[in-house]
Every structure is written in C-alpha cells, then in structure tokens.
Amino acid sequence: MNNSIEQIFEFLAADPELLIPILAIGGGLFIAFTAIVVTNVAGMVRYRARERTRREIAAYIAEGSISADEGERLLVADTPKRGGCGSC
C-alpha cells in the first residue's frame, strides 16, 4: 500500500501539470456530492416539519379547538403544489 502511494507521488512529481486537472475533477465531484447530500437533508427536514404540522392540526380537530372544515382548509393550504409556477 505504501509503495503504491509513493508511485503516485513520483508520477505527479514527474509531471506536476497533471495535478491541476486531478484536483479540479476531484473538487468538482466533492462539491456535487455535497450539494446532493445537503439537498436531500433539507428535503427530509421540510417533510418532517410538514408531517408534524399535519399531526398538530389533527390533534386540534380531535380536541375540538378547531372545526373539521377549518382543519381541512389548513391542510390544503399546507400541501405543496407540484407544477412549476406559483399559481398552478
């Protein structure tokens, strides 16, 4: 293992201009991977918050604090719109 790492360093020392594209590709892959992970975590957080809100509305309806019609309006208002435009 140590010998293979030494061979890589010797190869890069022989032609240091190869280091720039290697670092550019590696950096780009790291940024892309980080963006994917952050986007997925943010989606999970939004989903959990939405579900918590839905449970709270259901609890308010069950205890009689709000009517079923009001709860339905709140649940419909909280549902994300799929589409592409804000008015769809």
Image: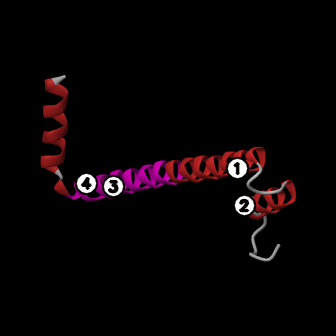
Rounded to the nearest angstrom, the CA distance separating label 1 from label 4 is: 55 Å
- Nearest the camera: 40 or 12? 40
Tell which residue pokes out farthest to the top in this image: 1
* Lower position in the chain sequence, tag 1 or tag 2: 1
Q: Amino acid at mark 4?
A: Leu
> Which residue, given by chain and number where applicable, does mark 2 sit on?
78
Marks counted in the figure total: 4
Q: Secondary structure at mark 3?
A: helix
Q: Which mark is residue 27?
A: 3
Rounded to the nearest angstrom, the CA distance separating label 3 from label 1 is: 41 Å
> Which residue, given by chain and number where applicable, does mark 1 sit on?
54
Q: Main secondary structure of the magenta part?
A: helix
* Lower position in the chain sequence, tag 1 or tag 4: 4
Residue 53 relative to residue 64: left or right: left
In the rendered image, residue 84, in percent from the top left (x then y), is placed at 75, 70
> Which residue, given by chain and number where applicable, does mark 4 sit on?
18
> Marks 3 and 4: which is nearer the front?
3
- In the figure, 1 relative to 26: above or below? above
Identify which residue is drawn at 14% across, 25% down: 3
Residue 3 relative to residue 26: left or right: left
Residue 39 shown in magenta: yes
Q: Which residues are magenta?
A: 17-40
Which quarter of the rendering shows the C terminus?
bottom right
Identify which residue is drawn at 75% across, 59% down: 79
Rounded to the nearest angstrom, the CA distance separating label 2 from label 4 is: 52 Å
